[in-house]
Amino acid sequence: MPPGNAASSPAEAAVIHDLIRYIDPDATEWKENEAGSRRRTLHYDPVTKRRILLVQWDPGYTISYLDTHEHDEFLYILSGTFVDQNRACGPGTFVHNEPGSSHRPTTPDGCTYLAVISPRFTGEAPADNGEG
């Protein structure tokens, strides 16, 4: 895909071989959450509502609201420092935020992390909340 023509969805950026999907993250667009925070959606399943995101925060960024988790959220810190009320986490740290947990994370030096947001299986598909 030529530079400046990023795909608007992971499906458009995917190359599929024998049921294996390869997504070049540079072929998807960064979407700004709020000033200092942006994300790339690498995968979204409209049936299960599972999302896999690459998230990047600028140095000094603090999330502007109390982030309360409705679903399991799994983070893997790739670079920089992710800080919440419990501890500072550097590269290689795995964080599991269980449903009902909340925090207001920040980063002193900027950070990039992989996030997997996955509703727990209840035997039926989750309601569509319009996120994707």
Image: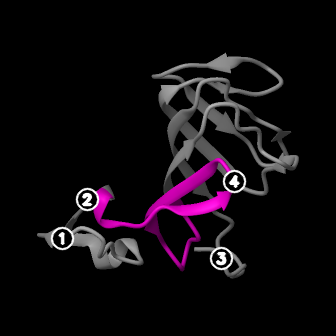
The secondary element bearing badge 2 is classed as loop
- The residue under the point 41% across, 76% down is 9
Identify residue type, mark 3. Glu
Give the quadrant of residue 103: top right
Say which element carries label 3.
loop
Mark sitting earlier along the chain (4/1): 1
Report how far apart the C-alphas of labels 3 and 1 lie in the structure: 30 Å
User: Which residue bears the numbered disc 1?
Assistant: 15
> Do labels 2 and 1 touch, CB within 8 Å?
yes
Amino acid type at circle 2 is: Asp
Q: Residue 29: which quarter of the image?
A: bottom left
Residue at figure coordinates x 47%, y 22% from the top left: 91
Query: Could you say which quadrant of the image residue 129 lies in?
Result: bottom right
Task: Name the N-terminal-most of marks 3 and 4.
Answer: 4
In front of the other: 46 or 25:
25
Q: Quadrant of the N terminus?
A: bottom left
**Magenta-drawn segment:** 26-51
For the point 50% across and 55% down, which residue is it? 53
Mark identifier at residue 24: 2
Q: Which residue is mark 4?
A: 35
Numbered label attached to residue 1: none
Q: Residues within 10 Å of mark 2 (few under 14, many from 20)?
A: few
Q: Nearer the viewer, mark 3 or mark 4?
A: 4
Q: Which residue has dot 3 on it? A: 124
Mark 2 vs mark 3, foreground winner is 2
- SS category of the residue bearing label 1: strand
The three-letter code of the residue at mark 1 reads Val
CA distance separating discs 2 and 1: 9 Å
